[in-house]
Amino acid sequence: MKILKYLSFLLVMLAFNSCKKEAESIFTMFKDIEVTFHNKSEYSITEDAVLNDGDSVHIHYTITSANEDMYRVVVDTTIGTGNYGERIINLKENERRSYSGVIKHKMMRDGKVTFRVYAMNIFNEYMGDGYTNITVDGRPSYTHLPNRKVYASRVNFAGGVAMDDNIDRRSFFSLRRAEAFDYQSGKTNSKDIDFGIHLLRDTRPAHLNRASFNLYSINTPTNPLPVYDISDWEKRNTMFSAPIKSAGTIFSQQLVSSSAIEARAKAVNINLLQTNITEWDAALGPGNLVYFLTPEGKYGAMLVNQTTSDNEGPYISVSVKYQN
């Protein structure tokens, strides 16, 4: 009986070892594919690189298969946000074992982009990518400052009547510093102040007594709030566009580099020193965006996240992006 037990154990071990030899490691099963990168021009890169906004690069590659015909080559592009894209290249008969191509890329987004080249066989099965890829990393070209509070002036709305409650709120804002100031501290820092906030009453019957948030430059010819004397303040001539409604997606997904911010800003008129819009949802309302141009020649955008109030008073929460 012992001999039978030992013989059974031996047979099991032999069968296990046999299966073990047949199961190929995931790290070697796609070894027939090789991808090589070539230096063919002044724009060529053959390894990971750090780029500036607007830089162009070429990735020349050759993908070869040692034992099986390739029918498609796929160029996979993965962006740091998790988004990805694919370009599928159907191969000709004479390209089944070796194919060369080039990826041309212009850096228009801060952050990392990874390029991977892999092959598919006649059954549209993955053959391998040579265990290699190239990542380009865009240097920061703009500044993003999220969720800053800017309060309305000490003029508020009670029953539709403008009232002065004698509270000096932080209603002056510096885009560059992403900081709000009250009147006294604003005067001290006037060289950095881009705008102040004032309120208008929405006169539409369905929205009576609702406050409409508006901005005004310190350089505006007519001060909408004479109670705050800014005549002796240092004047920053920051210019603004009219508010653009429902622009949250533009702010988050399209304003992703200095060049992208500039291109979008130049497509609108940036010619205002103040806004005077009574419709609350068309002024600095939630989801609305204002482009701006600073005296230093830098373009930017300000998104209104929400309009609300706290113990200090009514305010807008804004996020700002501007060119470095």
Image: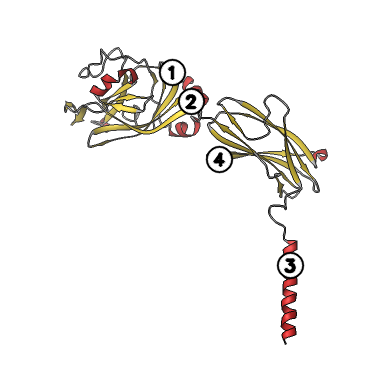
Q: In the picture, residue 269 is in which quadrant?
A: top left
Badge 1 or badge 4: first in the primary sequence = 4
Badge 2 or badge 4: first in the primary sequence = 4
The residue to which callout 2 is attached is 261
Viewer-side label of 3, 1: 3
The residue to which callout 4 is attached is 83
Viewer-side label of 3, 4: 3
Q: Position of residue 19 (x, y in %)?
A: 73, 66
Question: Would you say 96 lies left or right of 225 here?
Answer: right
Look at 75% across and 62% down and name the residue there. 22
Q: Secondary structure at mark 2?
A: helix
Q: Secondary structure at mark 1?
A: loop
Q: Amino acid at mark 4?
A: Asn
Q: Amino acid at mark 1?
A: Asn
Badge 3 or badge 4: first in the primary sequence = 3
Viewer-side label of 2, 3: 3
Measured Cα–Cα span from mark 1 to mark 4: 32 Å
Q: Secondary structure at mark 3?
A: helix
Numbered badge on residue 17: 3
Question: Would you say 279 lies left or right of 312 here?
Answer: right
Measured Cα–Cα span from mark 2 to mark 3: 62 Å
The residue to which callout 1 is attached is 269
